[in-house]
Amino acid sequence: MTMTDNELLLAISGMMDKKLQSELLPIKNDMKAVKDDVQIMRGDLQSTQEEVQTMKNDLQSTKAEVHQIKLYQENIILPRLETMESCYVDTYKRYKNYADKMEAVFVDVEILKKVVTEHSEKLQQIS
C-alpha cells in the first residue's frame, strides 16, 4: 500500500498542524493571560480615574466652602471685631484718663461716709 503524493502531503500537513498547535497552545494561553491582565488593569485605571474625578470634585467643593468662609470672615466677623475693639479701646482710654482720679474719689467717699455718719448721729441726738 503506497500513498500518493497528495496523501503524503496531507499527512505531513496534519502532523505539522498538530505540532504547531501543541507549540502554539502555551503562547495562546500566555496571550489570553496577558489580555486578562490588561482587562483588569483597564478596570483598575477606570476606577482610579473615577476616584481622581471624585477628589477633584471634593476639592472644588472645599475651595468653594473656604471661599465662603473667607467672605464671611471679611464681611461679618472682622467688622464686628473692629467694633468690639473700638469699644474696648474707647473704654480703656476713658478709664486710663480717670484712673489717677479714682483714688481721690475713694478718699472723698470715705470722708463723705464719716460726715454722713456724724451728721446722722447729730440728727439722732437732736430728735
Image (tube, rainbow, N blue to C red):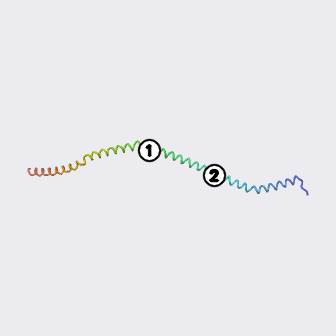
User: Cα distance, mark 1 to mark 2?
Assistant: 42 Å
Q: How many marks?
A: 2
Q: Residue at x 39, y 44 (%)?
A: 78
Q: Residue at x 56, y 48 (%)?
A: 52
Which of 63 and 36 lies nearest the eye of the viewer?
A: 63
Q: Which secondary structure, mark 2?
A: helix
Q: Is residue 70 left or right of residue 49?
A: left
**What amino acid does circle 2 point to?**
Met
Of labels 1 and 2, the one closer to you? 1
* Residue bearing mark 2: 41
Q: Residue at x 49, y 45 (%)?
A: 63
Which of 111 and 20 lies nearest the eye of the viewer?
A: 111
Which of 66 and 96 lies nearest the eye of the viewer?
A: 96
Q: Residue at x 29, y 45 (%)?
A: 93
Q: Are marks 1 and 2 in contact (CB under 8 Å)?
A: no
Q: Residue furthest left?
A: 126
Q: Is residue 52 left or right of residue 105?
A: right
Position of residue 30 measured from the top left corner of the image (x, y, whole percent): 70, 55
Position of residue 126 measured from the top left corner of the image (x, y, whole percent): 8, 50
Q: Dot 2: within a 10 Å radius of its alpha carbon, few (fewer than 14), some, or many (20 or more) residues?
A: few
Position of residue 66 measured from the top left corner of the image (x, y, whole percent): 46, 45
Quarter of the image containing the N terminus? Answer: bottom right
Which of 124 and 48 lies nearest the eye of the viewer?
A: 48
**What amino acid does circle 1 point to?**
Lys
* Residue bearing mark 1: 70
Q: Dot 1: within a 10 Å radius of its alpha carbon, few (fewer than 14), some, or many (20 or more) residues?
A: few
Of the numbered discs 1 and 2, the one sitting upstream in the chain is 2
Q: Which mark is residue 113?
A: none
Q: Which secondary structure, mark 1?
A: helix
Position of residue 67 measured from the top left corner of the image (x, y, whole percent): 46, 44
Q: Residue furthest top?
A: 75
